[in-house]
Image (cartoon, rainbow, N blue to C red):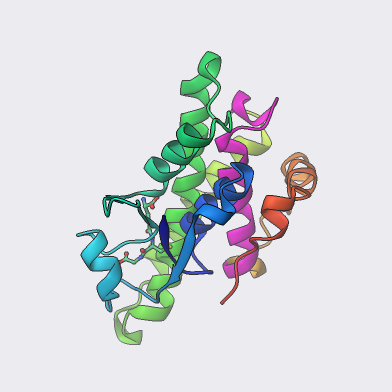
């Protein structure tokens, strides 16, 4: 299998973490690309009409996207056990929350880096950050039970989202006033799969 990837993408990272957790590292060849909504990489475009990464190209040439589909597939072929049946809806909802944090955080980066200076909107950026703060506050209040218990996909997605905030929006200091979430993150971040895949670039 091949993974179309960028080392900075939080969605790609979630997949890389699942590859590690599934023991599939030797079965996946990374294909690095640089792609943005304004300059789509040709390999990303040909594998995914949306031009977004990650994309997993299977050995028969079929492409799988997006990150949620890829993670589910990798779990399925490896039996990694990241989707506990008895609380699957809670787990998938928390994964969706974490992905939503990533979406908003990536859009903030695109606004600053890709939009012409005269067209940038600070109001729009702050509205994205507000989505993130509401999500972080809900996590701090422990509104999402799936964050407790045995390792599941939502833990990995949440850790990737928080690490991406450190990576791209560190000055906003998501830890401030969120001691419980900080403690959860510090403990979860010790996993080898997370330590070896920290975002870069
Ligand atoms: N929902 C998608 C989001 C993927 C995504 O937004 N990837 C970004 C990189 S972090 C991307 O490919 N951006 C290029 C674009 O939007 O054209 C997933 O979970 O895979």
x then y, percent, for residue 80: 58, 33
Occupied quadrant, residue 32: bottom left
Occupied quadrant, residue 23: top right
In the image, residue 45 above or below residue 201:
above
Q: Is residue 161 magenta?
A: yes
Number of numbered discs visible in the structure rendering: 0
Q: Residue at x 27, y 55 (%)?
A: 61
Residue, far top: 86
Task: Provide the residue span drawn in magenta.
Answer: 144-168
Q: Residue at x 55, y 22 (%)?
A: 84
Camera-side residue: 90 or 80? 80
Of helix, strand and loop, which mostly describes the magenta segment?
A: helix
x then y, percent, for residue 2: 41, 60
In the image, residue 122 above or below residue 65:
below
In the image, residue 193 above or below residue 172:
above
Where does the N terminus fall, quadrant-wise?
bottom left
Occupied quadrant, residue 118: bottom left
Q: Residue at x 58, y 54 (%)?
A: 25
Q: Residue at x 41, y 45 (%)?
A: 70
**Residue 121 in view of the camera:** yes
**Residue 161 in view of the camera:** no
The quadrant of the picture showing ligand 1 is bottom left
Camera-side residue: 174 or 75? 75
């Amino acid at each position: 299998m091949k993974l179309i990837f960028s080392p900075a993408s939080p969605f790609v990272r979630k997949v890389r973490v699942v590859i590690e957790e599934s023991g599939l590292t030797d079965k996946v060849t990374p294909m690095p690309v640089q792609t943005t909504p304004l300059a789509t990489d040709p390999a990303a475009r040909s594998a995914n009409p949306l031009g977004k990464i990650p994309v997993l190209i299977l050995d028969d040439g079929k492409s799988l996207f997006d990150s949620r589909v890829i993670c589910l597939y990798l779990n399925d072929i490896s039996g990694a056990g990241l989707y506990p049946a008895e609380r699957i809806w809670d787990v998938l909802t928390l994964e969706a929350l974490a992905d939503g944090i990533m979406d908003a955080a990536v859009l903030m980066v695109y606004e600053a880096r890709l939009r012409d200076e005269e067209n940038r909107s600070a109001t729009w950026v702050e509205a994205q950050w507000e989505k993130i703060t509401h999500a972080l506050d809900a996590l701090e209040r422990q509104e999402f039970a799936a964050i407790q218990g045995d390792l599941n996909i939502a833990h990995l997605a949440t850790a990737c989202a928080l690490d991406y905030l450190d990576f791209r929006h560190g000055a906003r200091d998501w830890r401030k006033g969120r001691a419980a979430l900080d403690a959860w993150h510090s403990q979860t971040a010790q996993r080898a799969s997370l330590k070896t895949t920290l975002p870069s670039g």
